[in-house]
Image: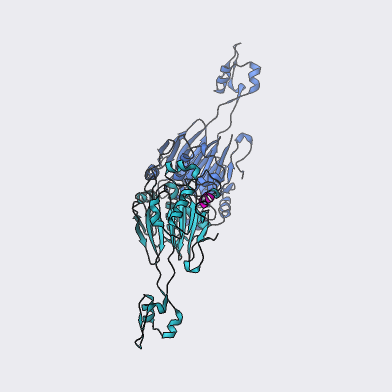
Chain colours: A blue, B cyan
Amino acid sequence: MIFELTFLGTNSALPAHGRYPSAQVLNIQDQLFLIDCGEGTQSRMVEYEIRQSKISQIFISHLHGDHVFGLIGLLTSLSLIGRKQKIDLFGPAGIKEIIEVQLRYSQTKLAYPLEFHITNTETFQLIFENNTVEVYSIPLIHRIPTNGFLFKEKERPLKIISEKIEEYGLSIPQIKAAKKGQDVLLDDDRLLPNHLLTKASYTPRSYAYCSDTLYTETIIPYIQHVDLLYHESTFLKENQQRAIETMHSTAADAAKIALKGEVGMLLLGHYSSRHRDVNVFEKEAQTLFANSVAGREGMRVQVPYLEEMAKPQVVQ
Amino acid sequence: MIFELTFLGTNSALPAHGRYPSAQVLNIQDQLFLIDCGEGTQSRMVEYEIRQSKISQIFISHLHGDHVFGLIGLLTSLSLIGRKQKIDLFGPAGIKEIIEVQLRYSQTKLAYPLEFHITNTETFQLIFENNTVEVYSIPLIHRIPTNGFLFKEKERPLKIISEKIEEYGLSIPQIKAAKKGQDVLLDDDRLLPNHLLTKASYTPRSYAYCSDTLYTETIIPYIQHVDLLYHESTFLKENQQRAIETMHSTAADAAKIALKGEVGMLLLGHYSSRHRDVNVFEKEAQTLFANSVAGREGMRVQVPYLEEMAKPQVVQ
């Protein structure tokens, strides 16, 4: 069961050095979640063979253009290619007006329902859930209302140990009861404790997206122990003052958060155009937090289940 | 003195087959005019080495997304890279609200003055002029208010025949008078008729941009004898019915307009994504109007002065 992040854009402010503005796709068990949508996101999806039809939820962190200018193009293109299923769009106040004014003047009616969910950027709260995943908003500190997102897989049901079905001649209702964690009463009145029949399922995986933000330790409780943390690193610590003025972070800031949050892997992005080579961000972060990786255009990072004894890894 | 058109996007509706939505840059004597601005235009400009700093006027034909979704990104990027000079933005009613709502929610203040000029899409009229060029709106027929644009070089001053300066010992004031078309009185009271001293300057060049539109002969008086005509050809004549329903044109329609307008060269574009190969548009148009060329991404077309005995040509 896949858990994979794809970077569609890693630059801040504007396209430069072959890097595009912020956008990512998170694939959790073949459901795709789009996170931010800078200009050109729809073209990047085609380039990286992201199946747009599998996206039903879009999450926008804030309304700076480098995180949202590609949204109207994507939404109207989805309509043009015949989408019928609903899209849930999560974003701060203003996003509805921005989309609707453009649809109105172009006299465009989307072919699918678009449901707006206005996020409260000041609170950590559950904003979406389905059978597989829960998504929470993470309050961030930036020049305009901004929040990050925490994606958590839900606990999966207990797994039945297949040999036990035959050994005890379990019926379908008995198997279902065991999967729910119940003990099972056999026909001969023996009571089988649940732990004899089942094994723990996989440990849920998690991803936290934090962009854009000033360095703030207030987010640590929310991102504690996530498998993957994306934390913006617009600047290097040599530009710490500039980071503070613009309410952004440095690669060292991101690494400090990763260290304090005891996360599995730190991913960097939202690079200032003053740096052509993103290795400098990776190196700065690695001095504080070893498992730091600079996100790159089109990069994919997978998180295996903990039980598979493998660690998060860059796959391409 | 250059007169050159560059195609930045030739597809309709959405990006497909490596083609992008509508955008063109017209270079007249080193002044750059941007015409329409689909998503990704700013990235195409970088790719084709268009000097954004030389653009001071932007012309938007209508508010369908494939002609305008790249505008907000370009305008904010120009600000980020430090532009100070004014931009004149020409477009139909609604364009101001679309741009301003996005600036407002992102709390962005552009670093340069942006002046909106709302076009009347129903009349042929002068909408911009400077020392070099005049630009007129061309009413088109589409699903929402739409107009094309006619770019005309202004007449240039007469050229003095350099040998005559020495022959008659002309002073600076006498040369200036001759360039204005006046006869010149010499110190010995001889009156030299102007035609002895000057020769005609170059014939002004012209470009008409017509997208998007149903086939309409009402535009012929406005585009008569232009050196270059761009006329949209979303479809082929095998899809004539679809063209009429969506208020677009076929390649054959475009060629008929070129023929009746007796233009120098016809350029095609705004292709439907159903066609991977744009040669089919070129072939259909050429059966009616021989000098038809299918616009392609990054293609440049130059118009030399008539007096240089060369014809409009694709240069790359």
- In the orientation shown, which residue stands out farthest toward the bottom? B188
Q: Position of residue B35 (x, y in %)?
A: 43, 55
Residue B79, quarter of the rendered image = bottom left
Q: Give A224 or B38, whichever is nearer the viewer.
A: B38
- In the orientation shown, which residue stands out farthest toward the top? A188
Q: Give B145 or B180, whichever is nearer the viewer.
A: B180
- Would residue B151 be counted in the magenta stretch? no
- Magenta segment, prevailing SS (helix, strand or loop): helix
Q: Magenta span covers which residues?
A: B281-287
From this viewpoint, is residue A84 visible? yes
The residue that appears at 50% across and 41% down in the rendered structure is: A34
Q: Give B188 or B12, whichever is nearer the viewer.
A: B188
Q: Position of residue B13 (x, y in %)?
A: 47, 45
- Would residue B284 be counted in the magenta stretch? yes
Residue B157 position (above or below residue A218): below
The quadrant of the rendering that contains the C terminus of chain B is bottom right
Residue A87 position (above or below residue A200): below
**Labels in figure, total:** 0
Residue A71 position (above or below residue A281): above
From this viewpoint, is residue B107 visible? no
Q: Give A271 or A256, whichever is nearer the viewer.
A: A271
Q: Position of residue A12 (x, y in %)?
A: 49, 52
Q: Position of residue B155 (x, y in %)?
A: 39, 68
Say whether residue A259 is left or right of residue B62: right
Say whether residue A64 is left or right of residue A53: left
